[in-house]
């Protein structure tokens, strides 16, 4: 049985190990891969305001998804960027969609308005995931990054989380959500993962 839950610094080594193979490919522009200590710093910093969730089975973390601030200026306080990464053995089970769905639901509850997915393209699995989760393709930045001997495109996807009307209330911080409510969202989304 799969479990989705909020991440802690104790998950940093597992998240770093999941992410490391991606850093050796064109699907992320980051390299070298971050260390477990750097991943712990990212989890701590991110989870202070936004959801960072992990999916595990039998105590083994197999994937994670999180959101973070889209841009620094105050006008973007209601916009977030999302990411998801899975271990190879966790792919093609619906885990990416389950993690993304849980993060999306929590972001909407926090009062965020727009979620952005940024995909180094071509990357059909990630493109399909965003489309399946309701994101729409916004635009492509062609040949924006150089990695592994070639110029790479970056495609932006957008999802409306809440329909804005007038001046918005400040988005809440992730730790302000009721823990039982978060657990219910995570449990419901985890049930959609195929064994």
Image (cartoon, helix red, strand yellow):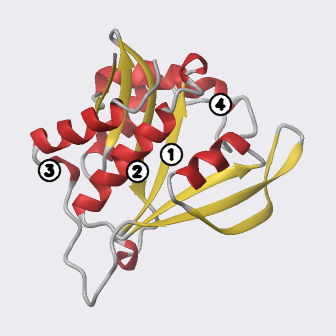
Judge by depth and name the residue closer to the eye, 46 or 105: 105
Where does label 2 land, which residue?
67
In percent of the image, x 37 and y 20: which residue is there? 56
Q: Earlier in the sequence, mark 3 or mark 4?
A: 4
| SS label for mark 1 | strand
C-alpha gap between disc 3 and disc 4:
31 Å
Mark 3 is surrounded, within 10 Å at the Cα level, by few (under 14), some (14 to 19) or many (20 or more) other residues, namely few
Number of numbered markers: 4
Where does label 1 land, which residue?
83
Q: Earlier in the sequence, mark 3 or mark 2?
A: 2
| SS label for mark 3 | loop
Where does label 4 land, which residue?
22
C-alpha gap between disc 4 and disc 2:
18 Å
In percent of the image, x 41 and y 25: which residue is there? 37
Is mark 1 in CB contact (under 8 Å) with mark 3? no
Where does label 3 land, which residue?
177
C-alpha gap between disc 1 and disc 3:
21 Å
Horizontal relation, residue 147 to residue 60: left or right: right
In percent of the image, x 66 and y 42: which residue is there? 28
């Amino acid at each position: 049985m799969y479990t989705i839950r909020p991440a802690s610094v104790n998950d940093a080594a597992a998240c770093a190990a999941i992410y490391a193979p991606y850093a050796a490919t064109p699907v992320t522009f980051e390299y070298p891969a971050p260390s477990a200590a750097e991943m712990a710093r990212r989890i701590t910093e991110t989870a202070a305001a936004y959801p960072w969730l992990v999916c595990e089975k039998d105590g083994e973390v197999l994937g994670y998804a999180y959101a973070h601030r889209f841009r620094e200026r105050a006008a973007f306080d209601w916009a977030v960027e999302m990411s998801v990464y899975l271990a190879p053995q966790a792919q093609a089970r619906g885990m990416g969609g389950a993690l993304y769905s849980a993060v999306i639901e929590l972001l909407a509850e926090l009062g965020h308005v727009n979620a952005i997915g940024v995909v180094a393209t071509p990357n059909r699995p990630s493109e399909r995931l965003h489309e399946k989760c309701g994101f729409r393709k916004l635009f492509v930045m062609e040949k924006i990054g150089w990695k592994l001997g070639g110029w790479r495109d970056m495609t932006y996807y957008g999802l409306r989380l809440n329909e804005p009307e007038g001046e918005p209330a400040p988005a809440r911080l992730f730790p302000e959500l009721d823990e039982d409510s978060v657990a219910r969202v995570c449990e419901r989304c985890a049930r959609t993962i195929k064994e």
